[in-house]
Amino acid sequence: MARSMSRNGKRIQPAMNVTPLVDVVLVLLIIFMVVIPAMNKSAHVDLPSLFNTDKEAKSKTDPFTLSLTLTGELYFEQDKVDAERMIDTLREANEKEPSRRLILRADRGAKYGEVRDLFKSCQEVGFPGVSLKVNEVKQQGKSNPSGT
């Protein structure tokens, strides 16, 4: 391999063109930005908000999710479930994995009676824990109510 020299006797330094690499990375980034939100097919639920919510418990298994939309539709995980089939679906899931908890997500506009009845049904199935999912409201400009 011959060494190339410039006129003044110094070696020429090769320069790497990274433009194609950057182009490929940006195209992949755009693809992931479009595809990832489309993969989340769970029901749209506008959760009620509370101050001082409990921190989410970290466990080895994620809890099941049951969602109640404003229109009264039920979703177990990401699958739509008929109200008549809901109890059977919950029982099957609890029998397969009896140690998993259940989180109930109900739209803030859903009727309280429906949410209460759904919560009771979930407890009767026998899940080790049934929780209500809510959003946390941040207090702005107020002191900490616990006094610390």
Image (cartoon, rainbow, N blue to C red):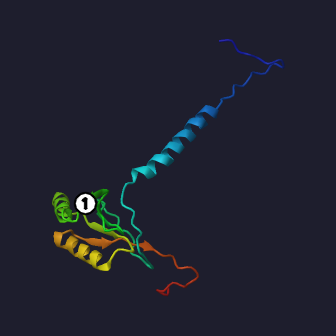
Question: Taking 40 as reference, is 112 above or below it?
Answer: below
- Determine if residue 18 is in view: no
Residue position marked by numbered label 1 in the rendering: 81
Mark 1 is surrounded, within 10 Å at the Cα level, by few (under 14), some (14 to 19) or many (20 or more) other residues, namely: some
Picture quarter with the N terminus? top right
Furthest-front residue in this view: 71
Furthest-top residue in this view: 2
Pinpoint residue 44: horizontal percent, then vertical percent: 39, 63
Judge from the rendering whether residue 57 lies leftward or rightward of residue 88; answer left or right.
right
Pinpoint residue 113: horizontal percent, then vertical percent: 28, 79
- Determine if residue 53 is in view: yes
Judge from the rendering whether residue 36 lies leftward or rightward of residue 20; answer left or right.
left
Residue at the image point whose x is 74% and y is 22% from the top:
12
Residue at the image point whose x is 22% and y is 76% from the top:
120
Q: How many marks?
A: 1
Nearer-the-camera pick, 72 or 36? 72
Residue at the image point whose x is 27% and y is 75% from the top:
114
Question: Taking 127 as reference, is 2 above or below it?
Answer: above
Judge from the rendering whether residue 77 lies leftward or rightward of residue 120; answer left or right.
right
SS for tag 1? Answer: strand
Pinpoint residue 112: horizontal percent, then vertical percent: 31, 79
Question: Taking 100 as reference, is 143 above or below it?
Answer: below
Residue at the image point whose x is 24% and y is 63% from the top:
100
Nearer-the-camera pick, 29 or 75? 75
Q: Quadrant of residue 93?
A: bottom left
Pinpoint residue 49: horizontal percent, then vertical percent: 43, 75
Amino acid, disc 1 = Val
Q: In which quarter of the image is residue 127?
A: bottom left
Furthest-right residue in this view: 8
Nearer-the-camera pick, 59 or 11? 59
